[in-house]
Image: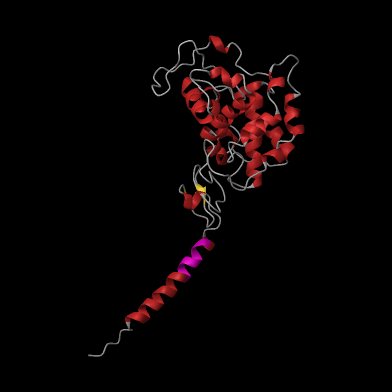
Amino acid sequence: MASNSPPPAAILTVLAIWLALHCAAIPAAAQSCNCQPGLCCSKYGYCGTTSTYCGEGCQSGPCSGSGGGGGSGTAGASVASVVTASFFNGIKNQAGAGCKGTGFYTRSAFLNAVSSYPNFAHGGSEAEGKREIAAFFAHVTHETGHFCLISEVDGASMDYCDASEGAWPCVPGQGYYGRGPLQLSWNYNYGPAGKNIGFDGLGNPDAVAQDPVVSFKSALWFWMDNVHRVMPQGFGATIRAINGALECNGRNAAEMEARVRFYLRYCGQLGVEPGSNLTC
């Protein structure tokens, strides 16, 4: 008995053409994705966290799996070109006389250390990379007093041991007070930082104050593990990630505003707009 329905082959051909046209239209309709913090914007404009989104062609966000040094970095800014000797020494030269840090922190040590963290200042546009550099050095400037401090003032008298952190037990006789460009503190930071960098963070935390490359690596480890992913939220989010419990929500507005001033200054020097959401 004859049928008025088209043959199966014809149906498949029409369906294939429809799917091809439909799929081709999707990327064009989603070129400008506005992903939530922590998500990657894929080359087609979709948001997600897998390699499909964060890998090749990733437009913004934690591209190429940012964090403790993995990945190869994408787009962004050339750190060595942006952090010139003039920029770096311009910060250090404002430290007061007699500062131990001025002979300890060097641009070459920073560049040596940053080579182990290729996603720093990468994963987005060049402007986003420059903003991340400005943010990093704003916090470093504030934490060290323009590269003056290597270790926290009177830090040895402070108790930064959290005994509840069983995975990173404190070693008797060792102090986990602030050291390095971001004043790394607490046993639960020294332990994993040492594991990532390659030193005994719990048994020898002083290494952060003795080797300038290790010192910068400790700061970059903390940054990539805790701060890098919140950069799309604005500078205020980086303050919250570093010292929010003490400075945000009106707890210490003066300290927060000091960080913002440094950030605005460095954005100006690097020729990049600071973006929004500067405070926390």
What residue appears at the point 55 percent right and 39 percent down from the top-left corner? 233
Where is the N terminus found, in terms of image quarters? bottom left
Left or right of 78 on screen, residue 2: left
* Towards the viewer: 129 or 169: 169
Relative to residue 1, is residue 256 drawn left or right?
right
Question: Image height check: is 58 above or below 256?
Answer: below
Left or right: where does residue 181 sit relative to residue 11?
Answer: right
- Residue under the point 72% across and 30% down: 88
Does any portion of residue 260 appear in the rendered image? no
Q: How is the image coloured?
A: secondary structure
Work out which residue is located at the far bottom of the displayed protein and give it: 1
Q: Position of residue 193 (x, y in %)?
A: 51, 27
Q: Which residue range is magenta in the image? A: 21-27
Quadrant containing the C terminus is top right
In percent of width and height, residue 252 lies at 57, 22
| Identity of the residue drawn at 52% across and 12% down | 158
Give residue 89's position: percent from left, percent from top: 75, 28
- Report if residue 25 lies within the magenta region: yes
Total count of labels = 0
Q: Is residue 270 magenta?
A: no
Query: Hey, which residue is sitting farthest left in the picture?
Result: 1
- In this rendering, does residue 189 appear at all? yes
Location of residue 228 (image quadrant): top right
Residue at (62, 32) in percent of width and height = 113
Main SS type for the magenta part?
Answer: helix
Say which of 160 and 208 sits in front: 208
| Whole-percent x, y for residue 248 in the image | 54, 27
